[in-house]
Image (cartoon, coloured by chain):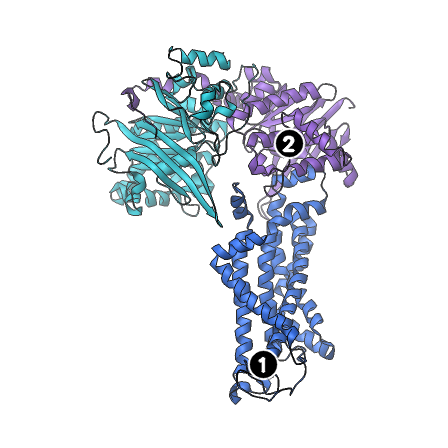
Chain colours: A blue, B purple, C cyan
Amino acid sequence: MLKTVRDLFRYNLEFALGAILILIVFAFAAASLFSPYPPMDIYVVAPDAPPSWAYPFGTNSRGQDVFWQLTVAIRNSLLFGISVALMSRVLSLLIGLVAGYAGGITDRILMTINDTFVVIPLFPILVLFFFMMRDNMSWPMLAIAMASLGWPYDARLIRSVALSLRTREFTAMSVFSGMSTRQILVEEHLPYVLPIVFSTTLNNMNWSIGLEVTLSVIGFTNIETPTIGTMIYWANQHTAMVAGVWWWIFFPVVLVIMTFLGLYLLSVSMNEYIDPRSRLTRMGGQA
Amino acid sequence: MTGDLLNLEGVTKSYASGGLLARRTFNAVDGVSFALDASRPEIFAIIGESGSGKTTLARMILNMVAASAGAIRFRGKALATIRGRRARLDFMRQVQPIFQNPYEAFNPLKRVDRYLYATARRLAGVGRKEVDRVCDEALRKVGLSLAEVRGRFPHELSGGQLQRTAIARALISGPALLVADEPVSMVDASLRMSIVELFKALRDELGVSIVYITHDLATAYHISDRIIIMQKGRVVEGGDARTVLDNPQHPYSKLLKSAVLSPDNAGIDAQAATHASDPNTVPVNVRSV
Amino acid sequence: MNARPHADGSADVMLDVKNLRAYYVMKYFGTQREVRAVDDISLRVGRNEIYGLAGESSSGKTTFIKTIAAAIRPPLTVVGGSIRYSFLDRDIYRLDRAALSAIRWRHLSYIPQGSMNVLNPVRRVRESFIDFALPHMDLPKQRFFAAIVAHLERLQLAPGVLDAYPHELSGGMRQRIAIALATVCRPDFIIADEPTTALDVVVQKSVLELIREAQREIASSMIFVTHDMAVHANISDRLGIMYAGRLVEEAPTAEIFRSPKHPYTQHLIASLPRIGDLSAKRALTGAPPSLAEPPSGCRFHPRCPLAMDICRETHPELVSIDPRHRVACHAVSPAVRPDGVFGATAKQRTGLVQ
């Protein structure tokens, strides 16, 4: 595994770039553990100071150090993205594999549900969700809501692969070897959909972080918790751009772009590496 | 009907085609009947070209698809009545498939031995300690050993070895019937006949009956006891393999036989065509570096 | 070697391949693998001749025809040797893209295993003819179509197929059209890659007859590749047998079937099933070797019933045992058995030929 990562790093430029970007972002998030100020506190430093040696990213109009504030914000955003991605992956895998393998009436019912979710307009639903929850709105709640909306495209993708796997001779061979359905799905078919799962995980993180930023910027989330989105929300509330406090917006935006780019590059390069066909060629077989 | 291992009565499989309004059905398999005797193991060949319905018929015998009409009985029990996991496992213990493409029949990303172990544990109910011995025994019946196969991926074995492994796996649960769909068409020529000969040995030494599905009249002649010839889902001729193939009666059977390429008149065309020139009549000094 | 080779008295050589070596050189994340798919092959194809090339999977036959058709894409690399066509003054693999497309169809054409490789699935057959043949025929459209129809009629194909889409036609019909397409420009050389393997037996026979007819009619030369010895028996004039990247035997087809010399060829022919023959077929042990790690010496020695010490150490040269018959086998070659009864001896010892 380590060797694989090293080889990828050496021979794949996209991977190297993506990994470096993501490492920086994660290191930044990890730095939040050493933050000298509690993240929710305001007016702990002099407000509106431009970047300097003492405050590398400056301070904002609420008297917070942008650097330390940002470490906490990116950590929360990443945690949010990862939990949405993981939850929605479980859903899409389960539904995609079962629908594809079972076929018939099971497939039709699951795909009807799937398509219903596909056509639901996401944004208004999430805004509605915010107005329903109001004061009870918490980040775990939002993550669950987004996870339950973020699976259908990928479930359909996984189903299409599972459909073709079902007709392959080795599936019949597994059945006639007495393997259980669970065993066939998990041990025989899962390796073929893993590349999809992997690249969609990274894409899904991008999607959920992006949507979170959008919702937060216009204030439809729990604005008390610092995230990239809520940082920009507060900056807008204090008309940071007009007031010339550009660093309050600039650094969060740069960091979130680095995250998007890093995740995207990783998903592209890993995809190529994990693809069963190219993996087979590396192993010395023919696809 | 207790004497029959396998009995097919008017078996038909129809598929719907066309749109909602102009809906038509077409019979992939149309009224096929035959029976295999339980007390007399034999190799029963089903011969046909693509579109003859021979593969659909094989899948129905394996209970992978249900017949639209007619009945298939295995040891007197209709396949349509097999319900539940226990009954299905019991059926699979006695009837096993051999597939066409050995490279497809084993998951390319998985080790080959997992299918042997799974069959031994789950179908044959072998205890953990006995698994290796049982698998090795089965592999030895086909001229391999567990040492050659263990831990290997499909691409590390030749097509012939893989097909033998597939046959060994099918033998683990001690089946009475093997259904082999074009088992040698993807196997290299130098290994093909050894697999065909292996089927004969399985019949004679283990008493396994084999439904051998093929388009190749020559190998069918070589190993089968009885044959049926299918065209567009129907059986056009059937009976003792030698009798039918030595002297086919139905026009389609005659056509099939006449299309078999014989190696016996090799190069006759070439000799007639004297205007073909051969650059090697002037001796060539061939040097290898 | 410059200019035209063998300018002396070998005007009838249409294709002259010398010591051709084509390897797959693969680099995956730091590990390099080399697969010697074509390793030192020399052969000639004469005018108006169908040269059959037989071999199993991983014998290198597919790589060989890719190379002589100049369809060389990485990781496939020509490492050495020459490929001279009579209509070219240099090795075909040195041509650039423009020069290659100038000779395609006009001088060198191709019949693939699946006709969908040449027929565009979303266009009528007529358009495929226009795409491939028109630029090479140098005729006004009206006369061009007259020529096409005449050609189709010679091959007993109804001109109506021109207006059909490929998917409306049966596999056999599509393959017939691919043959018509490959022969319409009267090319000097045709490469046929398993053209009948995907067809049913009844169709296969008539398609083989069509290939033979078309080739005789336009008097071109052909390399016909298939693993099926029965097909070779019915179409090839001369036959080359490939094993693990090397040519192990070559002779006129009738001669190969009557008296095969190499133990591998003997096995291939002896194990052919025939209607009316019930004798048990003997099997070779082992399996074709991997081209990434071929055995030392003669590549057939691990499976050979005649293997001697020398076979494990040095690889046998392909030598002429008579003017039309070449074999690469230590048990047959005069160097080892100077008594001159090599063929018979090999046969008796393997017991493969009755």
Image quadrant in which the N terminus of chain C is located: top left
Chain containing mark 1: A
Element marked by disc 1: helix
Where's residue C236, x and y in %?
38, 24
Residue identifier under label 1: A66
Q: Determine if residue B260 is in view.
A: yes
Chain containing mark 2: B
Quadrant in the rendering for residue A35 = bottom right
Element marked by disc 2: helix
User: Compared to B105, does A38 lie above or below?
Assistant: below
Image point 74% across, 23% down: which residue?
A: B4
Instruction: Give the class, few, some or many, for how many residues have Cα within 10 Å of label 1's Cα (few <14, many ≥20).
Output: many
User: Compared to C193, does A5 lie above or below?
Assistant: below
Q: Is residue B171 left or right of residue A15?
A: right
Instruction: Give the class, few, some or many, for how many residues have Cα within 10 Å of label 2's Cα (few <14, many ≥20).
Output: few
Residue identifier under label 2: B147
Residue kind at label 1, given as amino acid type: Val
Q: Determine if residue B233 is in view.
A: no
Image point 65% across, 26% down: which residue?
A: B211
Image point 68% across, 58% down: which residue?
A: A90
Quadrant in the rendering for residue B274 = top left
Q: Is residue B178 left or right of residue B155?
A: right
Q: Which mark is residue C69?
A: none
Q: Is residue B36 left or right of residue C257?
A: right
Where's residue C312, x and y in %?
47, 25
Q: Is residue A51 left or right of residue C316?
A: right
Residue kind at label 2, given as amino acid type: Ala
Where's residue A3, x and y in %?
56, 52
Where's residue C33, x and y in %?
47, 42
